[in-house]
């Protein structure tokens, strides 16, 4: 078995999730042709870097992310830093000849994402993106049903990601809520998942018209290097939120499917509700991440019992058996990240670019770009190829 050295930049919550995912790959997927080895982790907060080294078994830790790229034993760089750092770090990783997994949104804006995709393609390196929700076995089974034509010719699609992580006005002004550090708000952070899921299930998008809103316009200032976007601070000074809390869009797919996408980070009620409903001439499928180990299926050939029926994810669905042998024994968020890491390792083992790579991230960014343009024009905007800055 071939061993691949992993370096992770950014050891907040997401860097920790990725660390656990790489460690779990050999256990969950013993047939994987690659065994990932955690070499070095980097974080600007020294205590967090050292804690991650001890916790996950990295050989080294550092506060200088460039040392991850310079390390001779690192083959793969995993980028889990704030969005404004991605371009610089991807450039440096490509110059160092490292394969790259980057969290979404890959760029600070659509043009940066296009530049990043071009850099890595020209370098001849493999890439991967953290669109992890697509890996739920129930979602992959839904994709199979669509591809097999079980629900007929597709007619319409609805996708959403509704979370309340910033619904408390006392939630701090983290980097995600600042345009200079996070770029787009709900459009980048949340809508990227909804767009990726929609295009995976229903196909490329042709045109969109959208709207946005920032509902909470001032927030308490965050302490640099401490906490995350779930942290609160009710006593400190406040500053303006500089990107959007809410985005929705009507969409028309290239194959004629009509639909809508909606995302919000301040909604009350939903906690982590990413989902979709997809409809065709012969049936329909509904799925929601808050109940990720099941989906609802309706097929018109069931003439006696109309309506949706509940289907539990089980070992007959893609990769479920790698985690449990029985239906109804659920997977969790970290397991989706393990599946993501496995597919990336398999891509490296084969030397072939897998999905979702930076090309898919650019396709998502082109939809985001059209949604942004529609905020200004207040008209339908066609999806256009975007180039780097």
Image (tube, helix red, strand yellow):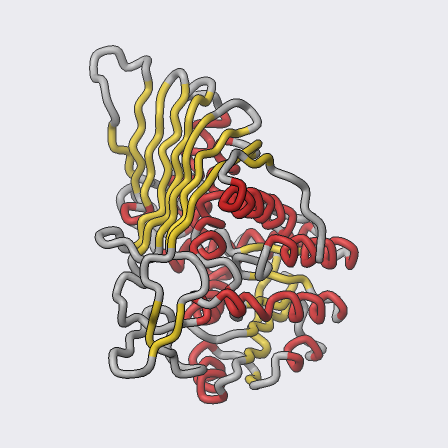
Residue at far front of view? 377
x, y percent for residue 277: 36, 33
Q: State which quadrant residue 137 falls in.
A: top left
- Does residue 46 appear to the left or right of 240 in the view shown? right
Q: Residue at x 39, y 60 (%)?
A: 334
Between 152 and 21, the one lying in front of the other is 152
Q: Is residue 356 visible?
A: no
Q: State which quadrant residue 36 falls in.
A: bottom right
Q: The N terminus appears in which quarter of the rendering?
A: bottom right
Residue 18 drawn above or below residue 277: below
Between 359 and 151, the one lying in front of the other is 359
Q: The C terminus appears in which quarter of the rendering?
A: bottom right
x, y percent for residue 115: 70, 57
Q: Is residue 244 visible?
A: yes
Q: Residue at x 60, y 53 (%)?
A: 110
Q: Residue at x 74, y 53 (%)?
A: 121
Between 219 and 334, the one lying in front of the other is 219
- Does residue 284 appear to the left or right of 353 in the view shown? left
Q: Residue at x 61, y 84 (%)?
A: 64
x, y percent for residue 97: 75, 66
Residue 80 drawn above or below residue 245: below
x, y percent for residue 87: 65, 66
Residue 258 drawn above or below residue 62: above
Residue 197 drawn above or below residue 224: above
Between 51 and 376, the one lying in front of the other is 376
- Does residue 46 appear to the left or right of 304 in the view shown? right
């Amino acid at each position: 078995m071939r061993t691949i050295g992993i370096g992770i930049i950014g050891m907040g919550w997401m860097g920790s999730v990725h660390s656990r995912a790489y460690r779990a790959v050999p256990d969950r997927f013993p047939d994987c042709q690659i065994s990932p080895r955690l070499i070095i982790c980097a974080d600007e907060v020294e205590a967090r870097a050292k804690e991650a080294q001890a916790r996950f078994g990295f050989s080294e830790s550092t506060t200088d992310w460039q040392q991850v790229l310079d390390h001779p034993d690192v083959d793969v760089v995993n980028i889990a830093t704030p969005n404004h750092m991605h371009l610089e770090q991807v450039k440096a990783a490509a110059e160092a000849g490292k394969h790259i997994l980057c969290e979404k949104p890959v760029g600070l804006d659509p043009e940066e994402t296009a530049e990043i995709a071009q850099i890595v393609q020209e370098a001849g390196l493999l890439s991967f993106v953290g669109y992890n929700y697509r890996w739920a076995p129930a979602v992959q089974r839904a994709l199979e049903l669509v591809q097999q034509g079980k629900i007929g010719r597709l007619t319409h699609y609805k996708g959403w990601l509704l979370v309340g992580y910033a619904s408390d006005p006392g939630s701090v002004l983290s980097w995600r809520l600042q345009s200079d550090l996070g770029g787009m708000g709900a459009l980048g952070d949340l809508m990227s998942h909804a767009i990726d899921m929609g295009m995976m299930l229903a196909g490329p998008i042709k045109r969109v018209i959208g709207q946005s809103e920032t509902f909470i316009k001032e927030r308490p200032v965050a302490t640099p290097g401490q906490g995350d976007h779930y942290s609160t601070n009710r006593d400190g000074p406040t500053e303006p939120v500089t990107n959007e809390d809410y985005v929705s869009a009507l969409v028309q797919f290239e194959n004629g499917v009509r639909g809508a996408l909606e995302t919000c980070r301040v909604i009350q009620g939903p906690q982590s509700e990413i989902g979709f409903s997809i409809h065709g001439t012969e049936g329909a499928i509904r799925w929601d991440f808050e109940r990720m180990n099941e989906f609802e299926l309706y097929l018109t050939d069931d003439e006696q019992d109309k309506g949706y029926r509940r289907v539990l994810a089980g070992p007959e669905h893609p990769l479920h058996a790698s985690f449990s042998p029985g239906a109804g024994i659920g997977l969790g968020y970290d397991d989706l990240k393990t599946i993501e890491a496995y597919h990336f390792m398999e891509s490296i083992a084969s030397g072939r670019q897998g999905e979702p790579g930076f090309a898919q991230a650019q396709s998502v960014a082109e939809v985001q770009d059209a949604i942004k343009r529609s905020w200004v024009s207040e008209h339908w905007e066609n999806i256009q190829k975007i180039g780097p800055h």
